[in-house]
Amino acid sequence: MRDTRPAMPKTVTPELLRAWPLPEPSGSKRSRGQVLVVGGALRSPGAAMLAGRAALRVGAGRLTLAIGSSVAAAVAVALPESGVVPLPETSSGSLRGAGIRSASVDLAAADAVLLGPGLDDAEETARMLPRAARAADRDTVLVLDAYALGALAGHPRLAGSGPRILTPNTEEAGRLLGREVRNLDADTRELARRYRATVSCFGRIAAADGRLFTVGEGGPGLGTSGSGDALAGAITGLAARGADPVQAAVWGTYLHAAAGESLARQAGPLGFLASEIVDRLTAELTALS
């Protein structure tokens, strides 16, 4: 009789990652992958900036931020490593869903797209998500975070049929499931199956085929404003480099947790900033080479 029980989770260790190396980088910024981050409304442009910087810190080659027009000029100066696409805004400074067409060329060219950091209007995000999925190339990895996950909840087809990664916290995972999270291992697997996606949730990474990986939580200091943007950006950057969605999520989640542990040793268990998590990613990546 066939054993239908789910496979045992794999604990992610440096040894496991070294035996599962990332795609070899080359010198060209385009060959190391193009990242597009869609987010950064008037009230929270820093979320998109953190995510974009994280993508660069893990080796992505080229970064573009599609953000609110009212903050685009300031962000372009604050993050000179990035290109900027100004997007139309509502009267309150949220991004208009239909306005994503302004980034259609960048969506088509991107190797990985992160949608969510700094978005703050549920209805406009629900309008934006399917338009972004249609404009992206069929092989582009779509990473969904924050309000994009709320838009996806109960509507898996909104994200198209291409490869996708979801990065919910436990509250967002509950919305996606339509109930409270009861068992993190089983529920992360359920999310991956239901939404046909790779899912990184609170140190668990599940693939749609049932595989499950576990990563240390990284300490309480990771529970800080912008930390989730750093995680989503790191995963997106690795996907742009050519890692498949499961590898990108496993490596990115591990690097995020390792950065938290390193900062806790250096600065104390609480009080370090998401920008410091981002800046620590490169050292943690180098330590695995």
Image: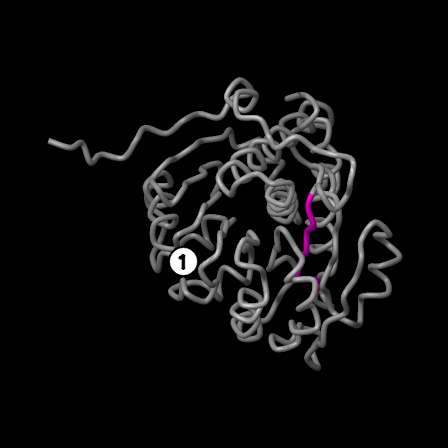
Q: Which quadrant holds residue 17?
A: top right
**Colour style of the rendered protein structure:** one colour
List the single residue furthest toward the top: 15
70 part of magenta stretch: no
List the single residue furthest toward the bottom: 91
- Magenta stretch, main secondary structure, is strand
Magenta stretch?
Answer: 33-40
Quadrant of image for the C terminus: top right
Q: Nearer the viewer, residue 161 or 56?
A: 161
Q: Which quadrant holds residue 25?
A: top right
List the single residue furthest toward the left: 1
Q: Nearer the viewer, residue 268 or 41?
A: 41
Query: In the image, residue 1 lies at what x, y percent?
Result: 10, 31
List the single residue furthest toward the right: 77
Q: Residue at x 89, y 57 (%)?
A: 77
Q: Along the horizontal axis of the image, is 171 left or right of 258?
A: left
Query: In the image, residue 224 lies at what x, y percent?
Result: 64, 44
Q: Is residue 86 above or below residue 13?
A: below
Q: Along the horizontal axis of the image, is 266 left or right of 135?
A: right
Query: In the image, residue 192 lies at what x, y percent?
Result: 39, 48
The residue indicated by pointer 1 is 176
Three-letter code, disc 1: Leu
Q: Name the element at disc 1.
A: helix
Q: Residue at x 80, y 57 (%)?
A: 83
Q: Residue at x 43, y 32 (%)?
A: 213
Binning the other alpha carbons within 10 Å of mark 1 as few (below 14), some (14 to 19) or many (20 upward) gives: many
36 part of magenta stretch: yes
